[in-house]
Amino acid sequence: MTHETQLQADQVLVEEWLQKHLDSLWPFGKLVESMGYSLLSGGKRIRPVLTLEACRLCGGRAETALPLACALEMVHTYSLIHDDLPCMDDDDLRRGKPTNHRVFGQATAVLAGDALLTNAFEVLAKTPELPPECQIQAVRCLAEAAGPAGMVAGQILDMDGAGRTLSFDQIRKIETLKTGRMIMAALELGCIAAGENGDRRLALLTYGEKLGLAFQIQDDILDQEGETEELGKPVGSDLKQGKATFVSLAGADACRKMVEDLTDEAAAAIAPYKEREFLCWLAEMLAERRN
């Protein structure tokens, strides 16, 4: 199986699980429709794929990690819905479609995000394939990555930094919290599903730290140089909002070199493991992506 085929197979697993899960929810008014609008709107599913592949690298079964991977994607989707709101980034386009609040209204969009966030933790706590102690680990891992010491902290720092001159270290902190923590959590959840607590877990977390930063820097480059039609969202939004990025600080060429170096460092972190090939390929693919 080629790496591209493996990626597509993982994406299908995630899509099918998410659709089945949404179908099982009580369809109260427009709520589930709004949740599904954003959750099933496409996307690369990189975070859940990382969970599945980390589990495989640690000797586990991807099917065991699948509910954890999808719970993570639900939290990621909630964050996108809320980030697009007028009180945040005020975006009209996401993945080539009108943003959730433009279709369902702000109140329903907020509630859809709330529902995805809370339901994700219900999924983790009800995962029958995992013993209770692993369920607790998974809940703690995702809560720490998404909460006030993780993604939410990165978002508030990002908003507070608008219109200000920030240092390299300040921008790195924002990017690590806003994007990196959830990517690291994706890998850690795969380790939890496989019962891995040793060197492989540490190596995968290092891989995730480097990959997450490279991913966000590439996003910053695309926000400056990409095309709206290709990205599926408006370009130049960071500049419009006066947000400091690595690109605004160091320039696009220096950022491309940072992405290259971080991708190499990510691959080096998992070099001892023969099952690393897919994750190394994925890091390279993400570094070269145009959307």
Image (tube, rainbow, N blue to C red):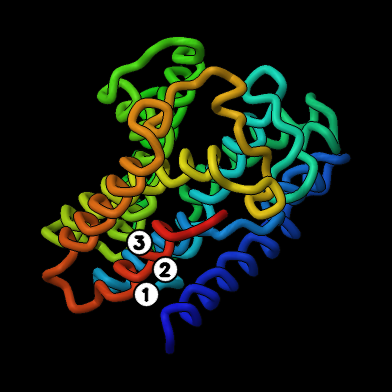
Secondary structure at badge 2 equals helix
**In the image, is residue 179 above or below residue 25?**
above
Residue lying at 35% horizontally and 61% vertically, measured from the top left: 283
Q: What residue does disc 2 label? A: 64
Query: Residue 247 is drawn in which quadrant?
Result: top left
Rendered image: mark on residue 283: 3
- 265 left or right of 158 in image: left
The answer to whether marks 1 and 2 mark residues whose Cβ atoms lie closer than 8 Å is: yes
**In the image, is residue 234 above or below residue 26?**
above
Residue 142 in sight: no
- Residue 289 on image: x %, y %: 49, 59
Query: Residue 280 is drawn in which quadrant?
Result: bottom left
Q: What residue does disc 1 label? A: 61
- Which label lies toward us, 3 or 2? 3
Q: Please identify the quadrant where the C terminus is shown.
A: bottom right
Q: Residues within 10 Å of mark 1 (few under 14, many from 20)?
A: some
Secondary structure at badge 1 equals loop
- Which label lies toward us, 3 or 1? 3
Residue lying at 79% horizontally and 25% vertically, measured from the top left: 106
Residue lying at 79% horizontally and 24% vertically, measured from the top left: 107
Between 246 and 82, the one lying in front of the other is: 246
The three-letter amino acid code for the residue at tag 2 is Thr
